[in-house]
Amino acid sequence: MPPAVKVAAQAVPKAAKTQAQKALDKLGLRRDIDLALHLPLRYEDETRITRLADARDGEMVQIEGLITNSEISFGPRRQLRVTLNDGTDTCTLRFLNFYPSHQKTLSVGARVRARGELRGGFVSREMVHPSFKLAGGDLPGALTPVYSTVAGLPQAYLRKAVLGGVARADLNETIPAAHLRNNLPQPMWSLREALQFLHNPTPDVALGASGRAAPTAHSPLGGQRSTRSDERGGFLADFQDHSHPAWQRLKAEELLAQQLSQLEARRVRAAMRAPPLQSSALQNTHASLHDQLLERLPFRLTDAQQRVGAEIAADLHKNVPMHRLLQGDVGSGKTVVAALAAARCMDAGWQCALMAPTEILAEQHFRKLITWLEPLGIKTAWLTGSQKAKERREALAMIASGEAGLVVGTHAVIQDKVMFKNLALAIIDEQHRFGVAQRLALRYKMTSDGDEPHLLMMTATPIPRTLAMSYYADLDVSTIDELPPGRTAIVTKVVNDSRRDEVIERIRSQIAEGRQVYWVCPLIEESEVLDLTNATETHEALSAALPGALVGLLHSRMPVAEKKAVMGLFNDGVMAVLVSTTVIEVGVDVPNASLMVIEHAERFGLSQLHQLRGRVGRGAAASACVLLYSTGDATRLGDTAKARLKAMLETNDGFEIARRDLEIRGPGEFLGARQSGAPLLRFADLALDAAWLAWARALAPVMLDQHAALAERHVLRWLGTKGEYLKA
């Protein structure tokens, strides 16, 4: 096995840091290579002066001329108005916020260069808050980069720091030459050339005069895409969509670093040891716990559940830690698969822990598992932060003695006082809601020297293929790709808020038929920014509109006992309507609920909308989901919101929802807390760069096996000390 890819960072000097150095630290720019890889957000073209007579309204232009008037006006708002004459026309420079230094520089008689968007004004054309400086000296020879920054770090300082980082950083090649020649864009760019170019693109390149920056972007699959003509705007658009060959080189490097680190994590884990969980029934005549549980279930497993159950069982029989992600759509039956895995663990004489992100979800699991496992003689301990002291002490004692074969709870499961006798299987539900440290803490609860517990992570948010290839490359993935029989199709309707009365009438008819209804709101109190109806007001309004029906309210700020009481009434069918925030997003299973109303649906993410919709359609009755949206002046329906609502209308398929969600949000938000403490892709786009991802996946094992030193340098360059998350 090749030596492990080490991940270490340069030590930070102990000397007192300046404000600018602290700001650089805040941006994560501690090493020269960090500075070199801090690429511009955009570029300003200060390489040419545009005559006002030739400029078009709406253009970003740089003009130069004489200040002929400068005054402060005191109309509805105090502002500085300056008139600039370039000899062909005049332009007003208008500042709503300004300092005495502005007035001094923009005094009458000064010759000034100003850059901004040219607009048509009441009297003459104008620029609002343009950048400006005194004219003089040669025009710059390159486009001016504009970087992401923080307070205390001006652009001028950051530009100088970045250029210094590029000059000092070790940018020698870490990708074997043969793989560079055969796969990277042509003409071939070195990493140093690509970075120097991206930080300081020259205007002759912008005009298409340089052969090296020919306006063609190549993909690793051999195709090519033409850019827009040889005009400067086309070139800058190339930069913006990252299709230029210099960007392509960085995408390839970044994806290779990610794949190397993921593959190394998988190999390191393969060298670890875990207890092989063989059933005690092999040495006895009684049926295994797994088989007994199967016999007692009131339903038959689907083919998909049986398949993933077999995959998990094969892992548990090995002495290598299982590291598996179980994904399945809402209602596909992941909990019973987890229960069967837990039964295999306990049948082998070991303990199992199941951790969920919310108390509602954890309690839902607890109730189901008790129903299934208690008749088999399995004792289950319950742990949450809201427990009374006596109940908690009893649970801790059961866990420490091994009396509790299964432990179910929230983050309380990983607290220091929780001591397992012999933990061998850790199950984490909705794993993306937990951070790296929390997942590691559960794994470290195993007390056997040198052994690791098996780890099963579950998610009801299916992972698109490119995301699984990239961020979950260190995991084995099992997929439940069918729903149990009897699940009714959910009809989705998108309804304008102006038709609220019709929706309430629909609720009346559902209640009359003995059905129950969810009404979900995005806020629980008034917001000065968003004019949204909150859960409390909605609860009051529905209570008044539905006399005789019990309408409940549930939100995250309620005391735990009150939450349990409300959910108990809804679970038991006593409560007709439950007004809630998104605390019911996952884990709530009430088969009699047949209507889901989501208030201000345009404010929810696509995955969240799909999860909420999945709370209905769990019984025999026809079910519906109403997406109420508002298009008032305060909340105009944007393109992203339209895309989400359109997706919800067009499909109930969680995998298709996940694919569209990735397109809309990108991987960073999609992944949630899984990557906490780890770098998300900054340059590559999984929706567009699947070919580069395939190239990196193929090259990673070659690098680790044949070029271990280069692989180590490559990962260090791109990931620094941020590889710890791979252990989780």
Image (spheres, helix red, strand yellow):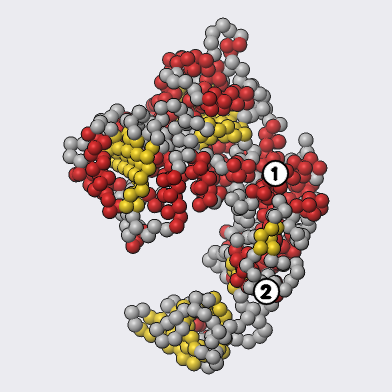
Q: Quadrant of the rendered structure where residue 181 is?
A: bottom right
Q: Quadrant of the rendered structure where residue 16 is?
A: bottom right
Task: Please state which of residues 393 and 646 is positioned toward the viewer in this rendering.
Answer: 646
Q: Position of residue 602 (x, y in %)?
A: 39, 52
Task: Please state which of residues 21 and 592 is positioned toward the viewer in this rendering.
Answer: 592
Q: Position of residue 69 (x, y in %)?
A: 46, 91
Q: Is residue 489 left or right of residue 110?
A: left
> Compared with residue 184, is residue 427 higher up or lower down, i.e. above or below?
above
Residue type highlighted by circle 1? Arg
Tag shown at residue 406: none
Q: Position of residue 103 (x, y in %)?
A: 48, 85
Q: Kindly state the secondary structure of the residue where label 1 is placed.
A: helix
Task: Please state which of residues 719 and 438 is positioned toward the viewer in this rendering.
Answer: 719
Q: In percent of the image, x 42 and y 58: which residue is there?
A: 638
Crowd band around label 2 with a 10 angstrom C-alpha radius: few (<14), some (14–19), many (20+): some
- Residue to which mark 1 is pinned: 697
- Look at the image and tell me in which quarter the N terminus lies: top right
The outermost residue toward the top is 285
Q: Is residue 21 left or right of residue 661?
A: right
- Is residue 443 in sight in this rendering? no
Crowd band around label 1 with a 10 angstrom C-alpha radius: few (<14), some (14–19), many (20+): many
- Residue to which mark 2 is pinned: 207
- Is residue 491 in sight in this rendering? yes
Residue type highlighted by circle 2? Leu
> Compared with residue 86, is residue 45 higher up or lower down, i.e. above or below?
above
Q: In percent of the image, x 71 and y 47: which residue is there?
A: 695
Q: Position of residue 379 (x, y in %)?
A: 46, 19
